[in-house]
Every structure is written in structure tokens, then in C-alpha cells.
Amino acid sequence: MKKANFITGLFLAMLSLFVIFEAKKMPAQMPGSGLGPGVLPFWLGVGILVLSIILILQVLLDKKTRSKSIFNRSETISVGIMFAAMVIYAFLMSFLGFGTATLMLVVFLVRRIGNYAWWKCGTMGLIVSVVSVYLFRVLLTMPLPSGVTGF
């Protein structure tokens, strides 16, 4: 694990130096605004560089080696299931509509994470989907996919 962290730290340090170098080519300020297109990439590069240096120093200063894995199998499977749910949500949104897909996603996530009763999951999903549709479609007048359900 130490070797992987060290290699990752070096790779991220080189990537951040490249981002900083390329961001310096962009203008830091634009007429009429205080910030330009080079400000955000520059500071993101600096942040990644600092974090990669911290990772490299942790590897170099850590005297004991860890032989056990950081993640166990069930945690990794749970993260994979959550990721798959988000991908399915993104695909179903255009077919079923934003509100219906959000309702289904929230019910699934609340049930999976909290293991609550189905009626509590359904109530939470209904509240979240109605509030989000009202907020985005009505108050912010954003076009949302309505799908076959119209919600």
C-alpha cells in the first residue's frame, strides 16, 4: 500500500504542476470582472499539489507497514451498488421524468442506507421529489425532463 500511495502522490504532484503551468498561460483577470479563466485551475493545481505532498510525506514518515486492506468487501460492494443506482437514475430520468426517477432513487437510497420501513422511505422520497420539482421547475423555471409520467 505504501508503494501505491507513493506512486499516486508522485503522479498527482506531476499532474498538479502541469495544471499550474497551463493555468499560468491563461489570463488571471478579464476586463469587467475580478477573476479570469486561469484563477480556478491555478488554485485547484495548488490544492492538489499540497495534498499530494502530504500523501508522499505520510508514506515516507510512516515506519510501520500496513498489510491489511483499507476497504472490506461489503463496503466496496455497497459503494458499487450506490454508483449503479446513480447511473440507472441518470438513464431513467429522461424516460420516467425527473420527479419519478428522483422518487425512486430516494426511496432506494433511504431504504439501503437507513433500512427504514417502506412507508417511511416512500414518504421521504415523495417529499424530496415534490420539493425538488417545485423548486427547480416552478421557482427557478428550469426545464426538467417530464418523461411518460409528466412528473
Image: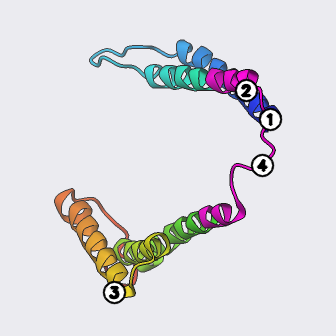
Q: Nearer the viewer, mark 3 or mark 1?
A: 1
Q: Quadrant of residue 150?
A: bottom left
Image vertical order of residue 85 relative to residue 23, above or below: below
Marked residue nearer the N-terminal end (3 or 4): 4
Amino acid residing under circle 2: Asp
Residues packed near mark 4 inside 10 Å, few (<14), some (14 to 19) or many (20 plus) = few
Q: Is residue 134 left or right of residue 128?
A: left
Q: Which residues are magenta?
A: 52-79
Image vertical order of residue 54 relative to residue 31, above or below: below
Position of residue 105 measured from the top left corner of the image (x, y, whole percent): 44, 73
Amino acid residing under circle 3: Trp
Location of mark 1 (residue): 65
For image coordinates 27% across by 59% down, the residue present is 142
Q: Is residue 103 magenta?
A: no
Mark 4: which secondary structure? Answer: loop
Location of mark 3 (residue): 119
Alpha carbon of mark 2 to alpha carbon of mark 4: how far?
Answer: 15 Å
Position of residue 86 measured from the top left corner of the image (x, y, whole percent): 52, 65
Q: Is residue 64 magenta?
A: yes
Alpha carbon of mark 2 to alpha carbon of mark 3: how far?
Answer: 49 Å
Alpha carbon of mark 3 to alpha carbon of mark 1: how far?
Answer: 48 Å
Marked residue nearer the N-terminal end (3 or 1): 1
Location of mark 2 (residue): 62
Alpha carbon of mark 1 to alpha carbon of mark 4: how far?
Answer: 9 Å
Amino acid residing under circle 4: Lys
Q: Nearer the viewer, mark 3 or mark 4?
A: 4
Q: Quadrant of residue 123?
A: bottom left
Which of the numbered marks, if any, corresponds to residue 68? 4
Give yes or no for contact between labels 1 and 2 (Cβ–Cβ under 8 Å): yes
Mark 3: which secondary structure? Answer: helix
The residue nearer to you, when weighing 20 against 4, is 4
